[in-house]
Amino acid sequence: MESIALFSVKELSKTYTDKSNWFKKGRDVTIGPVSFDMHRGETIAIVGDAGSGKSTIARLLAGAELPDTGKLFIGDDEVNWHDSKFFCQNIRMIFQDAQKSLNPTVRIGDQLEQPLLFNTRLDKHQRLERIYDALRKVGLLPEHASYYPHMFSGGQAQRIGIARALILDPQIVIIDEALAPLDPSLRAQVINLLLDLQETLQLTYILISHQISLVRHLSDRIFIMDQGQIVEHGKVEDVFENPQHAKTQKLLKSLDM
Ligand SMILES: Nc1ncnc2c1ncn2[C@@H]1O[C@H](COP(=O)(O)OP(=O)(O)OP(=O)(O)O)[C@@H](O)[C@H]1O
């Protein structure tokens, strides 16, 4: 049975003036317009060459940047792109370099407390409970709240990144190449953790990855991006078994195992 759409994106687009190389200098690069639905508890993979617009879509959806056009609906209600509190609470990102995204001079508990201070009315005791709970959810211990980032391994730092993403009980988590730096056994542990959390919390994941095995293992649907457009989309097994677009065929062959 088809589940009800949690979020709908309509005609989302962003145009940049590309300053990345001399030949393209001054030329506009447009990402979109793209439209799609996201359902509760599903994982959507966005796959495409470097520069195809994957991270731009992610940043727009996370409210980190304003689109030029487009609407975002939750159920029938339109979301205001300027409502930063909505984005903070509902759509969170997990970053590639977990260690770098943490402030080295601030204890983990204080870093996890920041979003709670800015976005909730919880008192100190309730905030601490929420922090301990988030640490437990990702397989860490309440006492880790008093540690500094350098006291954690790469895999643990990624777990803290996940705890930070989850602390406000979001509905959507964007995983932008966040698993790429981990070695295979750590990656497998973090993947299992993400799958467990998805099931328990009914999270929707948007996965941006170049790793074909990961995309295949984690995703329900896949969007193939090329030059700012979604050129093919569908259930992951259908797209992998019967890719229609030439770009999809090329990408699926070139993605690493
Ligand atoms: N802030 C910006 N200013 C100017 N151009 C930008 C900006 N952000 C992205 N672009 C351009 O938009 C295009 C899409 O970039 P984006 O980072 O979304 O691609 P991507 O598919 O995520 O690539 P990668 O896999 O390398 O992360 C590129 O041409 C890029 O140069």
Image (cartoon, rainbow, N blue to C red):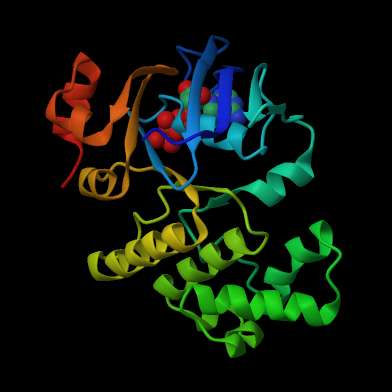
Horizontal relation, residue 241 to residue 194: left or right: left
Q: Residue at x 28, y 31 (%)?
A: 235
Residue 135, above or below 23: below
Horizontal relation, residue 80 to residue 187: left or right: right
Residue 249, above or below 217: above
Count of marks overlaid on the render: 0
Q: Residue at x 51, y 60 (%)?
A: 201
Quarter of the rendering occupied by the N terminus: top left
Quarter of image, res 76: top right
Residue 122, x across and y down, in percent: 83, 70
Residue 156, above or below 166: below
Residue 105 shows in the view:
no
Residue 73 shows in the view:
yes
Residue 115, x across and y down, in percent: 74, 61
Horizontal relation, residue 201 to residue 164: left or right: left
Depth check: give the residue in front, 100 or 76: 76
Residue 82, above or below 117: above
Horizontal relation, residue 52 to residue 160: left or right: left
Quarter of image, res 195: bottom left
Depth check: give the residue in front, 1 or 24: 1
Residue 249, x across and y down, in percent: 16, 23
Quarter of image, res 8: top right
The residue sitting at the top extreme is: 27
Residue 168, x across and y down, in percent: 68, 60
Q: Residue at x 78, y 77 (%)?
A: 126
The residue sitting at the bottom extreme is: 143
Q: Residue at x 50, y 81 (%)?
A: 140
